[in-house]
Structures are given as C-alpha cells and as structure tokens.
Image (tube, grey):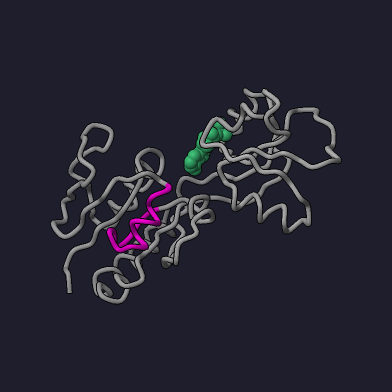
C-alpha cells in the first residue's frame, strides 16, 4: 500500500477557504500557490501533497487516480460526465447559488428562450425537468455580457453577493442549485488507502461541523 495522499485543489476562493479545514487535520501547505509557480505543493506532513489544477480539472485528476482526493465545487461536479468518484463530504465552503438571471424589467419570453452559460449540462437538465425547450449557448466566461449585447435572453451563472449581476443590469429569477465545495475521492484509493483516507474524512467531518 502506498503511504501517501495527493489532494487536487484549485487556486482562489476554494483554496483559501479550505486552508482552515486542512489546518484542522494538521495539514499546512509549505508554498503559497499565488506566489510559487510550483503545481505540486509539499505540506508539513511528508505523506500529504497538494496539486494545484483548474477547478474543472479536479474531478478528472481524481477519477484517473492522479490525485487520491480533491476539493471541487458542486457546480463543477454537476457538469462532470466522467465515470465517477466518491463524494463523501460537503465541506460547506465557497458557498454560492447557481441562478437563472434575466435583464431587470424584462418581459416574459414566449418563444424559444436563449440561455448563455458555461453550465450546459446543468442548464439543459434544469429546463428539461420543466418540460421547456431552450437554446443553450456555451460561453467560457463573462456570461453577464450576453443579455446586454443580445446574444441571449437569460444566463445561468454563479451568484454570491449578486453584485456582478446587478452591475450588468441583471436580476436572479430562479435558483437552480445551492453550491458548496465537496471532498471527492478516487474509488481505488478509497479501498487501497483506506487506513489513511478514512480517518482524514472522519476528522474533516468533525472540523466542518464545528465551523
Ligand atoms: P457576486 O458578484 O458576489 O455575486 O459573485 C459572482 C461572480 O463570482 C460570478 O462571476 C461567479 O462566477 C463568481 N463566484 C461567486 N461565488 C463563487 C464560487 N463559490 N465559486 C466560483 N465562482 C464564484
């Protein structure tokens, strides 16, 4: 049995909010991902490493076992179409909502709605559940621009304070999902590294419940 654990994580809000939880496991990264160019961070625990990857790549690294565990937003997991990872724990960090948003004071659209988003699968499922056919336009960022420039009628995006929507004349009209970050675990690692991973999950759950 390999006696080390690799955790995939993305930079930014998830990394920052995960730090206190990792500290609760006495895991402290020895480099700051905003300063170093290294993508593999060592920690004070010789058997624990963090790998810094794009948020949307976290499930891929974990599914293929390149990382044993990962921390990924529910938004990313809902869009992930891989063969599966375990999702044993909601860390309740990086919380926000995935919302459908429309221009303020816009009229009801009776014809085929055009929705711009990077969350194509989740958006399709949401409207399919309502029995509503929509045209989905895939974008990779700055979704808020789409209704302003007439590219789409509405957007699906993440909302935290609502400032970004407001600044672009948009208002949320429906909540599609409550989002937070989850621990995910490679299926083989869960079996092979059971003795390392199980206690980590147990302790993490206790730390999460305390915060
Ligand atoms: P806000 O203006 O506070 O509503 O934040 C909205 C912007 O921040 C959107 O462009 C989102 O893509 C991004 N955002 C907010 N919360 C999160 C989160 N938990 N994870 C990733 N992106 C987020």
**Against 149, is 65 above or below?**
below
Is 109 left, or right, of 134 in this rendering? Answer: right
Nearer to the camera, 56 or 151:
151
Q: Is residue 149 magenta?
A: no
Left or right relative to 195: residue 185: right
**Residue at 16% in and 68% down:** 3
Task: Decide which of 201, 168 is in the foreground and name it.
Answer: 168
- Above or below for 8 versus 38: below
Q: Nearer the viewer, residue 144 or 200?
A: 144
Q: Is residue 145 placed above or below 10 in the rendered structure?
A: above
For the view shown, which residue lies furthest in the left direction?
A: 46
Task: Assess whether residue 70 is covered by the magenta stretch.
Answer: yes
Instruction: Report the span colored magenta.
Output: 56-71
Q: Position of residue 84 (x, y in %)?
A: 44, 66
**Residue 58: percent from the left, percent from the top?**
38, 52
Q: Residue 21's spot in the image, x, y percent?
A: 34, 52
Give the residue displayed 53% in from the left and 53% down from the top: 79
Residue plotted at (66% across, 37% down): 155
On the rendered image, what quadrant is the N terminus found in? bottom left
Q: Nearer the viewer, residue 128 or 89?
A: 128
Viewed as shown, does residue 86 lie left or right of 20?
A: right
The residue at 49%/51% (across/down) is: 76
- The total of numbered circles placed on residues is 0
């Amino acid at each position: 049995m390999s006696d080390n654990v690799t955790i995939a994580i993305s930079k930014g809000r998830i990394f920052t909010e995960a730090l206190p939880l990792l500290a609760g496991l006495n895991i402290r990264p020895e480099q700051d991902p905003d300063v170093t160019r290294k993508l593999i961070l060592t920690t004070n625990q010789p058997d624990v490493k963090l790998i810094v990857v794009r948020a949307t790549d976290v499930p891929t690294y974990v599914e293929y076992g390149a990382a044993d565990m990962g921390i990924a937003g529910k938004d990313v997991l809902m869009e992930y179409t891989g063969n599966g990872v375990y999702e044993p724990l909601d860390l309740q960090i990086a919380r926000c909502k995935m919302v459908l948003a429309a221009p303020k004071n816009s009229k009801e659209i009776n014809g085929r709605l055009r929705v711009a988003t990077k969350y194509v699968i989740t958006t399709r499922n949401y409207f399919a559940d309502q029995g509503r056919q929509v045209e989905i336009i895939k974008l990779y960022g700055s979704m808020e621009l789409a209704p302003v420039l007439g590219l789409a009628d509405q957007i699906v995006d993440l909302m935290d304070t609502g400032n970004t929507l407001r600044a672009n004349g948009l208002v949320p009209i429906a909540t599609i999902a409550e989002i937070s970050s989850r621990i995910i675990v490679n299926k083989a690692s869960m079996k092979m590294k059971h003795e390392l991973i199980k206690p980590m999950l147990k302790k993490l759950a206790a730390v999460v419940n305390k915060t």
